[in-house]
Amino acid sequence: MTVRTRFAPSPTGFLHIGGARTALFNYLFARRHNGRYLLRIEDTDRQRSTPEAVKQILDSLEWLGLSPDEPPVFQSTREARHAEIAHALLAMGKAYLAFDTPEELQQMREQAMKEGRPPRYDGRWRDRDPSEAPPGVKPAIRLKAPREGETVVKDLVQGEVRVANAELDDMIILRSDGTPTYLHAVVVDDHDMGITHVIRGDDHLTNTFRQCQIYDAMGWHRPQFAHVPLIHGPDGTKLSKRHGAVSVLEFREQGYLPEAMCNYLLRLGWGHGDEEVVPRERAIRIFDLADIGRSPSRMDYAKLTHLNGIYLRQADDERLTREVLERFARRNVLFGTEDAERVRLLMPELKQRAKTLEELAGAAAFVVSDGPPPMDAKAAALLTPEARARLGDLALFLNDAPWERKDLEAWLRDYAEVKGVKLGAIAQPLRAALTGSTQSPPIDAVLYALGRAEAMRRILAAAEGEEASPA
RNA sequence: GUCCCCAUCGUCUAGAGGCCUAGGACACCAGCCUUUCACGUUGGUAACACGGGUUCGAAUCCCGUUGGGGACGCCA
């Protein structure tokens, strides 16, 4: 049988990293077994579902490279089918009409809580005849759940989990307005979509028992289940905005690469020996549900950032250049084709020293400037009168140099040797003059990327003590 | 409250009874490399929650305690 998995978010907000990881696991598992990976939008809650959220989720998945193999199924379009199954259950005597009002149920729950009992429906309409129904109350359909024995779920991650049926009450499968409840819709949809493996968050584990009861009542074959522990914030509590970024798009904003995101998310709660850097192709080959841990894990931004640095260094220069220019544009940094070319030339060096695209853009920003770049305090401090004088001298010397990186380095070394000083004594003031900072790519690379004219302009400006607007 | 799940360095994890003096990675500290910053590299600090069993032997199996998490809607 072909493996079919699905990711089933409800479009009530952005896609957060927990959902992203669930999607990733579903994707990986399907690919690993040459199966299909599907998407179902669970939008049966009309109040809270929004088209914006749907778009956000789709965008997030696309960015992560986790777009589904088929167009998404919208759960709301399937309500007639959900109702059909609910009525079938009713006809089979495996469900019943319940004429309770929301107020009564609320009361029942409060009463139970007060008496220290679990808040469960008492099944008061389970065996009553609909003719006893109070006038004007529209009935909901409840599943006639088994009251004895136990329901056992063989979970691919959690192992065998069992619960006494006495713990479970008769859940509503079709609301009094004729719409399906989540628990019921999920089962019908998963069945109709031919889902073989339900991989989802741990928070659904206890729901699974009830869902199994529906499968059993319909005589449907149950899918395999795999419940993945949730991701917590760094402090171990539920992940929320106060911990930092949680939405996938936020990470994109902050300059994380999708492949780094996926690698990090994969390693969170899943392990394969000592492997840390696991690119997509490799992940597809070795992913196994059995390797998912059973305890919740905490979000570690530092490790994500580290991983992002690794992927950044391996990333294509053209791609990174595009990303940087995009970020320039977003920061309203005006740049021309010359500036773009400089970024491109410098990229092999720039990407060595950045961990996110934001950092990368920040480190590249100095190339965009006519004349002296904005100077930070440390850089300004390097430009002593002596240093300025030396820069003036150096400018004359360098003016005759062939403008190739190798030659520039050689000329600088020669110059330092002739003057009897360490290279650093030359390089640091020069760096300040060229970049406005004490940190930058190798100075020969900077000289080369800037080009003779611009480099000279900046050196001379510094030599003459021309101040740029302070940074 | 009831039910379910979980428990190895600060964090992510390796570990399926002897290979464990518990390994790797991030973070942190120190050294090296070096034209700065990074990268890289070498070393260091740091964990089997606790208590009982089982066993010749337990991080690994069992029970309990404690601690975390999740679920208990005519939400998804």
Image (cartoon, helix red, strand yellow):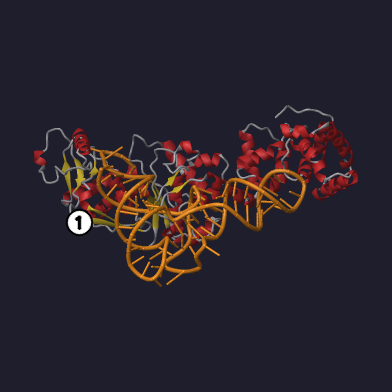
Q: Measuring from the top left, give residue A284's x and y in whole percent.
A: 49, 59
The correct choice, above or below, for A375 with respect to A175 in the image is above
Count the marks: how many? 1
With A87 as the anchor, is A437 left or right in this view? right
Q: Which residue lies under the disc numbered 1?
A: A149
Q: Which residue is pictured at 37% across the width and 49% down the height?
A: A202
Can you say which quadrant of the picture contains the C terminus of chain A? top right
Q: Quadrant of residue A379?
A: top right
The correct choice, above or below, for A106 with respect to A154 in the image is above
The correct choice, above or below, for A50 with respect to B11 in the image is above
Q: Which residue is pictured at 49% across the width and 42% down the height?
A: A248
With B71 as the anchor, is A378 left or right in this view? right
Q: Measuring from the top left, give residue A363's x and y in whole percent.
A: 67, 40
The residue lying toward the viewer, choosing from A404 and A264, is A264
With A181 as the anchor, is A278 left or right in this view? right
The residue lying toward the viewer, choosing from B29 and A421, is B29
Chain ID, mark 1: A
Q: Measuring from the top left, give residue A427's x and y in whole percent.
A: 80, 42
| Mark 1 residue crowding within 10 angstroms, few (<14) / some (14–19) / many (20+) | few
Q: Which residue is pictured at 14% across the width and 42% down the height?
A: A124
Q: Which residue is pictured at 36% across the width and 35% down the height?
A: A48
- The answer to whether residue A198 of the structure is visible from this angle is no
- The answer to whether residue A8 of the structure is visible from this angle is yes
Q: Measuring from the top left, give residue A443's x and y in whole percent.
A: 77, 44
Can you say which quadrant of the picture contains the N terminus of chain A? bottom left
The correct choice, above or below, for A431 with respect to A287 in the image is above
Question: Does dot 1 land on a helix, a strand or a loop?
Answer: loop
Looking at the picture, which amino acid does disc 1 mark? Gly
